[in-house]
Amino acid sequence: MFDKIDKIIKEKKLTPPDCTYHTLRPLENGGRLRVLVVKGEDVAHAELICPFCGKYTYSKQEYKKVSKTSKIRMRVECSSCGKKTKVEKLKGKKEKK
Ligand SMILES: [Zn+2]
């Protein structure tokens, strides 16, 4: 569970410069979200542990550029409960503690 994107990365031997977009973030209630967009593709691979029902979902969707004013990059729908989790843009610079 939650290794599908990991496998894609390993199979394709992707490194950060090969990725248009890649995020892995914790959600409330123990949920997790991972999104990967491979450079040159317009498909977003999304893995979700739903913060609402705790179920695992892997899905693909078209990756579209969003306007700069939008706070949300995309939405990932849970295949079990149908609730959508927003992928919010992270503001500012990357922080590492
Ligand atoms: Zn759910």
Image: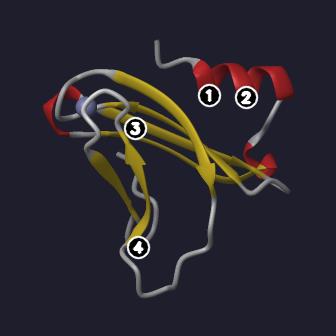
**First reached walking from the N terminus: tag 3 or tag 1:** 1
Check disc 2 and give the amino acid type: Ile
Label 4 sits on residue: 92
Q: Position of residue 34 (x, y in %)?
A: 48, 38
Cα–Cα span, label 1 and label 4: 25 Å
**Helix, strand or loop status at disc 2:** helix
- Circle 4 packing at 10 Å, graded few (<14), some (14-19), many (20+), is few
Q: CA distance from mark 4 to mark 3?
A: 20 Å
**Which is nearer the eye, 78 or 14?**
78
Which amino acid is tagged 4? Gly
Inter-mark Cα distance, 1 to 2: 6 Å
Q: Is residue 66 left or right of residue 16?
A: left
Q: Do tag 1 and tag 2 residues touch (Cβ < 8 Å)?
A: yes
In the picture, which quadrant includes the C terminus? Answer: top left
Q: Which residue is mark 2?
A: 9
Task: Give the image location of residue 70, x and y in percent.
Answer: 40, 80
Q: Looking at the picture, does residue 9 appear above or below residue 68?
A: above
Does residue 29 sit above or below 94 in this rendering? above
C-alpha span from label 2 to label 4: 26 Å
Which circle's residue, 4 or 3, is located before the other in the chain? 3
* Residue at disc 3, secondary structure: strand
Callout 1 amino acid: Ile
Q: Which of the pair 37/82 is nearer the observer?
A: 82
Q: Which mark is residue 5?
A: 1
